[in-house]
Image (tube, rainbow, N blue to C red):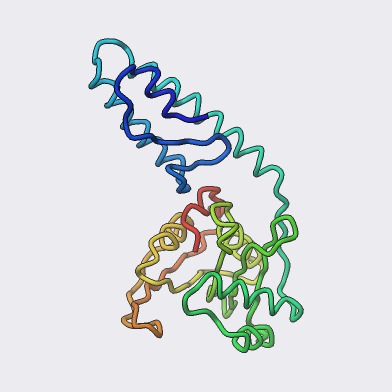
Amino acid sequence: MMLSLYVQGVIGAEPVEPVFFFAGADRFNGVAISAPCCCYIFQAFFYMASAFNPESGVAIRLVGESIKFMRQEHDLASNADNSLQYNIRLMEKKDLDAVVGAERLCYPYPWSAELFRQELDNPLSTIDLLFINEQLAGYLCSWLICGELHIHNVATLPAFRRRGVAARLIRYVIDRCPAAGLEKVLLEVRVGNAGAIALYRSFGFVDVVVRKKYYSDGEDALLMELDIDRSKPIFLSLQGENHDA
């Protein structure tokens, strides 16, 4: 099913540049997009339809078709999510090869196997692995020190992005810590990683300071902080994977 069929059929005008929407996936010309992006595209079609015949009611019918299509896509996506089984457990030494391989897929400057071994041996460090249908989908390395949770590495494998992996991991490690007197969460992120920054801000992280040339390639790091207010729950945003770290 293609939305371009709605457009050309309803408007009755010369065919425009085709825009393909395949049922079962939020994609624009083969590129994954989020629901808000769909709204902007539908809004563009609204104005295009009005331009062809402002008084014909075409735009209203087109928007109706667009809304119907979005509901169909949402139902398909919801059904797909319900079939996924998420599981989080602690990393063990037997997981080292899989995690190191995943790290190389996720980052241009990956952690080494030796660094992961050091984290496994460090009593302050915890590495949580998230599996989807028994496949490694992401992981998060953190330290808990004197009421502060320091997130050092969070990653989602490319094949599992846009499924809330990073958001689930962040919420999991935060929810686990209140009994230990958690007061704040700290992390550094590359200033150019807009998706990760947006994800952290969705949890309530705020900018603290930019650390110049923090990374080995010379890129700056943004230090972010989340103050834990125990009167407010940390909500898991299913939109989170749209900005996966």
Q: In the image as oriented, which residue stretches furthest toward the top?
A: 56
Residue name at image x 43 percent, y 23 percent: 6
Q: Nearer the viewer, residue 192 or 148?
A: 192
Q: Residue 97, located in which quarter of the rendered image? A: bottom right
User: Picture coordinates of residue 90 (x, y %)?
Assistant: 72, 71
Q: In the image as oriented, which residue stretches furthest toward the front?
A: 14
Residue name at image x 56 percent, y 53 percent: 233
Residue name at image x 55 percent, y 70 percent: 105
User: Picture coordinates of residue 46 (x, y %)?
Assistant: 32, 25
User: Picture coordinates of residue 223 (x, y %)?
Assistant: 40, 73
Q: Is residue 13 left or right of residue 199?
A: left
Q: Residue 95, located in which quarter of the rendered image? A: bottom right
Q: Nearer the viewer, residue 23 or 184?
A: 23
Q: Is residue 104 above or below residue 85?
A: below
Q: Is residue 158 above or below residue 145?
A: above
Q: Residue 123, located in which quarter of the rendered image? A: bottom right
Q: Nearer the viewer, residue 7 or 62?
A: 7
Q: Is residue 227 left or right of residue 57?
A: right
User: Picture coordinates of residue 234 (x, y %)?
Assistant: 55, 55
Q: Nearer the viewer, residue 170 or 78?
A: 78
